[in-house]
Image: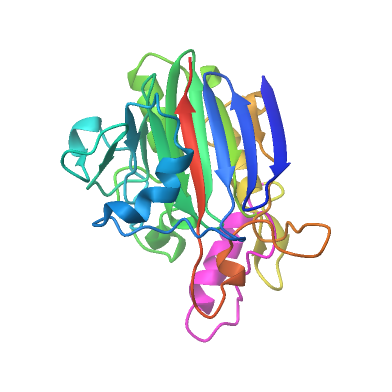
Amino acid sequence: MLEASAVNRSRVETRTTGFGPAEIQLFSGAGDIDWSVDRSKLDTFDEILGVTPPNIQKLWMPRPTEANGELAPQGDFSPLFDGHEHPIIMGNCDADGCIVRHGDAFGLLSADCATLVAYADDMVIAAHAGRDSVMDRTVIAGGDPSRDYSGILESIVVEFLDAGYRPQDVHLGIFGGIQSNFLHDPTHPEYGEYNRGLIHYAKQFEGALINEEIGDINMNALIRAKATQIYGINPDKIIDDGVDSGSDRDAHGNLLWASHRHAKNGHRERNFILVRHTQ
């Protein structure tokens, strides 16, 4: 069952969603707080640690910058900071996501890229779902597949299959992503060819292509349609939180969420997404 609440705080816009055995908290980076961190400096995690409940044992934070579509086994992680506990921050791993055990949490810094949370019974997976995580960029450009799985959705489904679950058993949530103003100019002098391939690809998924002329793509719709059309997840078991990082504004016209589409002076602010396995 989906339960959601949105609260305006003096320092940061937050949204909390209960989703099966998971709780997802989205903290905005568009206001007073920029959640960006330096993974070599513990003091840059102060804001993140300040909103992480004290009963969390480990906070799993893979590096998703490669958008490789992979889920990492926990053995691929190691503590970012020796001696720091409550929680132990697990990182040093290039991946989009991982399984989240009971009592642990998954943390992601994002601006427009959605966070996927999937569960079946009490098994929970959380993952970054950037454009290149969801789709193999080399295939979109007309080349051969560059990785074992086509993207993060296939990785998630295979993980559940290996655990004995069918795709129909899986619940999928899409949180904090961009649903409009995600433009891919088909006439761009450098990226036009790739953008035309992406537009052609998006056409096959209902609701994914908002405007073909400017290449405006709704990533939530693309993820939802791909999950159902290709991987067999029940559409009645897919939800999103209604957030549109590219367009959501408050009553005064201010952006609610950090977005790469609205970067300030070249500085890319980040939102912080915390996924807790609570049951």
In the displayed structure, 236 sits above or below 173; it is: above
Q: Position of residue 142 (x, y in %)?
A: 42, 64
Number of numbered tags placed on the structure image? 0
As drawn, 228 above or below 249 = above
Horizontal and vertical percent for residue 102? Answer: 39, 19
Q: Is residue 197 visible?
A: yes
Quarter of the figure with the N terminus:
top right
From this viewpoint, is residue 154 visible?
no
- Judge from the rendering whether residue 143 lies leftward or rightward of residue 177; answer left or right: left
* Residue found 24% across the figure and 46% down from its top: 93
Rendered residue at 37%/57% (across/down)? 37
Query: How are the residues colored?
Result: rainbow
Q: Is residue 259 left or right of residue 75?
A: right
Residue depicted at x 68% and y 52%: 244
Residue drawn at point x = 32 percent, y = 26 percent: 57
Q: Which of the 4 image quadrants contains residue 132?
A: bottom left
Residue 181, by quadrant, is: bottom right
Residue 192 point in image, percent of width and height? 53, 78
Nearer to us in this view, 138 or 65: 65
Q: What percent of the width, then of the height, locates residue 209?
A: 68, 57
Q: Nearer the viewer, residue 158 or 273?
A: 273
Rendered image quadrant of residue 246 = bottom right
Out of 161 and 24, give the one closest to the viewer: 24
Q: Nearer the viewer, residue 18 or 72?
A: 18
The magenta-colored residue range is: 179-205
| Image position of 173 with respect to 112: above or below | above
Question: Residue pushed farthest bottom?
Answer: 189
